[in-house]
Image (cartoon, rainbow, N blue to C red):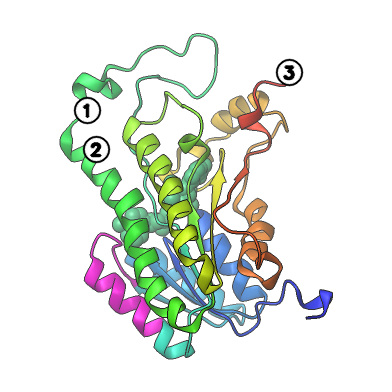
Amino acid sequence: MKIADLFKVEGYGVVVTGGASGLGLGFAEALADNGARVTMLDIDPERIAQETQRLKDKGYDVRGAVVDVTDHLALDKAVDEAAALYGKLDVVFANAGIDSGPGYLNAWVGGNRGRNPEGAIENYTDERWQKVIDINLTGVFATCRAAARHMRPRRQGRIIVTTSLAGLTQEGVIGSAYMAAKAGAAHFMRNLALELAAYNICVNAIAPGFFVTNIGGGHAHNPETQKTVAAHLPMHRVGWPEDMQGLALFLSSPACGYITGQQIVIDGGWGLGTAD
Ligand SMILES: NC(=O)c1ccc[n+]([C@@H]2O[C@H](COP(=O)([O-])OP(=O)(O)OC[C@H]3O[C@@H](n4cnc5c(N)ncnc54)[C@H](O)[C@@H]3O)[C@@H](O)[C@H]2O)c1
């Protein structure tokens, strides 16, 4: 292979869960802009219709479908349909995820962030815990399973899981189910990487820090929040979906043919500690 072709994903068949918004939309756009054929799956009918049309208008080969990753039959069917249409499945992003509601702390940063009783363990409901696990952990499992069914026979593929810095370090402002789900997704990813390595399938994860998306009702769009968090981050700015696109392309491409079971943190240095 020519070195110039290392990042070529032209003609690839790609599926992205949670593809209608934020990071997943950024992944879809990055791949489609490089000539891949992308199916975006999302639970939000309006957003998926709107974003699919927007990307089509840009000339991209994209399609969208309304799928809830907790509906495993519907998920399998949607992945099968995409693979049948493309004649193969090269890349799957297991990305769909939700915020878990309040954690035990009140604010992202600061010396005295205050305790939030709503996020305290004594008040954490089974429903809240289960919903986060169902989407952020079991949804990842079901997406990877659907992908592997197509990739293993071809002995080729890339699976990319969106985890979180929150699966590596503790963050009290985020509900604890999120920590557990993301750490679980990362460890599951490594086990799957081990299982599929002999089949030339690379399984890796992207662990974002603080990114401006629509998660949690879009709280990160608040300029005050961005300013406060940015001041605390070593790179002095929050992340945007565009900051992810190079990594998404790399992990999808032939350039990433000998890297598997890795979780790449992309956080402007947040996980390193306090710089200033
Ligand atoms: N934004 C951040 O700072 C950040 C940090 C770390 C990790 N993440 C992770 O990134 C991933 C993408 O989140 P985002 O920040 O882009 O949020 P987002 O809300 O902008 O996008 C998530 C998308 O997933 C979809 N979705 C939610 N539940 C679904 C379900 N059951 N089935 C199918 N689709 C579903 C939503 O409709 C939405 O379009 C998530 O896994 C999230 O946990 C985000």
Q: Which residue is the site of mark 3?
A: 276
Q: CA distance from mark 2 to mark 3?
A: 35 Å
Instruction: Characterize the local packing of mark 2: few (<14), some (14-19) or many (20 or more) Cα atoms within 10 angstroms.
Output: some
Q: Is residue 209 magenta?
A: no
Depth order, front residue of 23/165: 165
Mark 2 CB lies closer than 8 A to ligand 1: no
What residue span does the magenta drawing correspond to?
66-82
* 269 relative to 7, above or below: above
- Secondary element under disc 3, as helix, strand or loop, is loop
Depth order, front residue of 101/152: 152
Q: Which residue is the site of mark 2?
A: 129
- Report the side of 145 relative to 6 (left or right): left
Q: CA distance from mark 2 to mark 1?
A: 7 Å
Q: Position of residue 44 (x, y in %)?
A: 34, 62
Give whichever of discs 2 and 1 has the lower sequence position: 1
Write the residue at 29% across / 44% down: 132
- Secondary element under disc 1, as helix, strand or loop, is loop
Which quadrant does the N terminus fall into?
bottom right
Q: Kindly indicate the quadrant of the structure image that contains residue 223.
A: top right
Confirm or deny contact between disc 2 and disc 1 (CB under 8 A). Answer: yes
Q: Which mark is residue 124?
A: 1
- Secondary element under disc 2, as helix, strand or loop, is helix
Q: Is residue 46 visible?
A: no
Q: Is residue 71 magenta?
A: yes
Mark 3 CB lies closer than 8 A to ligand 1: no
Q: Amino acid at mark 3?
A: Asp
Give whichever of discs 2 and 3 has the lower sequence position: 2
Q: Amino acid at mark 2?
A: Trp
